[in-house]
Amino acid sequence: MKVTYLGHSCILVDTGKHQLIIDPFLTGNPSAAVAADDIQVDYVLLTHGHSDHIADAESIARRNNAPILAIVELADYFAGTGLQTVGMNLGGSRTFPFGKLKWVPALHSSSVNHNGVNVYLGVAAGILLDIDGTAIYHAGDTALFSDMKLVSSRGPVDLAFLPIGDHFTMGPEDALTAAEWIGAKHVVPVHYNTFDAIAQDGEQFVADLARIGITGHALKPGDSLDNF
Ligand code: NI
Ligand code: MN
């Protein structure tokens, strides 16, 4: 299995058999590693409706004939545009051809801006994947909350993507606590340095993780990890 950081919160997961993209925000993202038109995937997973997570969801899903997997209200929004979707909700899991997907809580909001008006579309979520026994957690956008201790109560998380940008999500200090509570073996910081408001030092965060015994990877957009 290989995961590739495409910038901001966007992750490409290559299971060897299937390709998944999480939170595609490439068009309009100054740090994007690739163009949305070059993405080839089987599934599009969305943590919540904010534009920096769904900007390219519709075009990628349509061109690839790939279903959108999301919390039910956000899924229904895309179903309304004629796309295939699987709407689920918090605590719910389902086994797909690529592995098991579970929607877990995130402390954030979820809306789509429609003609200048914010339309709220259910809750924000995190994603827990179990692919061939490897647990991957994408926290989405979130504040620190103590129920993160329960995200993977049945076993350790092999790889966690945690926002560190502050301002809209938790910052590096809270993300360190989150990494500890989750019991993550490997952590990749995301949702930082895309814009001035979320400027952070990824290498410093990784050094701080090392001090509490967790392996961090400050991936640059386009970098991959295949050993975790
Ligand atoms: Ni957001
Ligand atoms: Mn965001």
Image (spheres, rainbow, N blue to C red):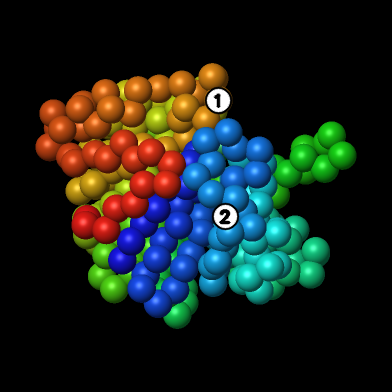
- x, y (%) of residue 69? 58, 64
Which of disc 2 and disc 1 is earlier in sequence? Answer: 2
In the rendering, at what x and y percent does residue 8 appear?
50, 39
**The one of 63 and 24 positioned closer to us in this rendering:** 63
Q: Position of residue 134 (x, y in %)?
A: 27, 65
Report the residue at 33% width, 28% height from top: 202
Q: Residue furthest bottom?
A: 97
Nearer to the camera, 47 or 13: 13
Question: Along the horizontal axis of the image, is 215 left or right of 19?
Answer: left
Q: Position of residue 164 (x, y in %)?
A: 40, 30
Q: Secondary structure at mark 1?
A: loop
Task: List the residue tagged with mark 2.
Answer: 46
The amino acid beneath tag 2 is Leu
Give the Cα distance between marks 1 and 2. 21 Å
63 over 73 or under it: above or below = below
Q: Is residue 215 visible?
A: yes
**Residue visible at 83% across and 36% down in the picture:** 117
- Quadrant of the rendered image holding ligand 2: top right
Asked if residue 151 shows in the view, the reply is no
Graded by Cα atoms within 10 Å as few (under 14), some (14 to 19) or many (20 or more), the crowding at tag 1 reads few
Q: Secondary structure at mark 2?
A: loop
| Residue linked to disc 1 | 195
Residue 66, image quadrant: bottom right
